[in-house]
Image: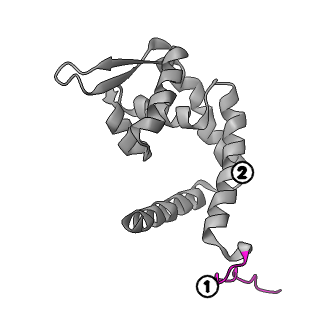
Amino acid sequence: MTKPTAPAAPTAGSLKLDDQLCFALYSTGLALNKVYRKLLAGLGLTYPQYLVMMVLWERDGVSVSEIGQRLYLDSATLTPLLKRLQSAGLVDRSRARGDERQVIVSLTQAGRALQEPARAVPLGIFGAAGCAPEVAGSIKSQLEDLRTHLMRHG
């Protein structure tokens, strides 16, 4: 019985596409987004909208800047996204009472009602990924570490 070989480590200075960490992440992201697109179609959400909704399902009534910090998005990217969610009747945006410069985003009844059917999305992702939850958790943890290191240099 032959022992499986570990994948070759990328060679420093290599310009081969298949040696690039960035390409592995990019192409995996594309594949993941395809799966999300299918799973989210029934909810009427795009992936970025789904991320915003998850932030609000965790904690309703947060500022645009707090959402941006959680999702690593600037307000120029977030504002049109929030406007579309508001047009869809899923969120309300209002000025903060204590500070008119801040915009507070809150779920509507329809936005809260979407949370229950959205619970099927992570299950669909696990199924499509074809890996055990422990493996997915380990990959997630490694990616979070990678993100932390990269953000220090970005």
Q: Amino acid at mark 1?
A: Gly
Seen at 37% across and 21% down, the residue is 106
Magenta-colored stretch includes residue 9: yes
User: Which residue is label 1 attached to?
Assistant: 13
Q: Quadrant of residue 98?
A: top left
Seen at 71% across and 43% down, the residue is 35
Write down the region rendered in magenta: 1-16
Q: Mark 2 or mark 1, which is nearer to you?
A: 1
Quadrant of image for the C terminus: bottom left
Report the front residue among 60 and 19. 19
User: Which residue is label 2 attached to?
Assistant: 31
Position in image of residue 54 (x %, y %): 47, 34
Above or below for 81 versus 135: above
Seen at 39% across and 33% down, the residue is 58
Position in image of residue 69 (x %, y %): 36, 44
Q: Quadrant of residue 17?
A: bottom right
What secondary structure prevails in the magenta region? loop
Report the front residue among 147 and 116. 147
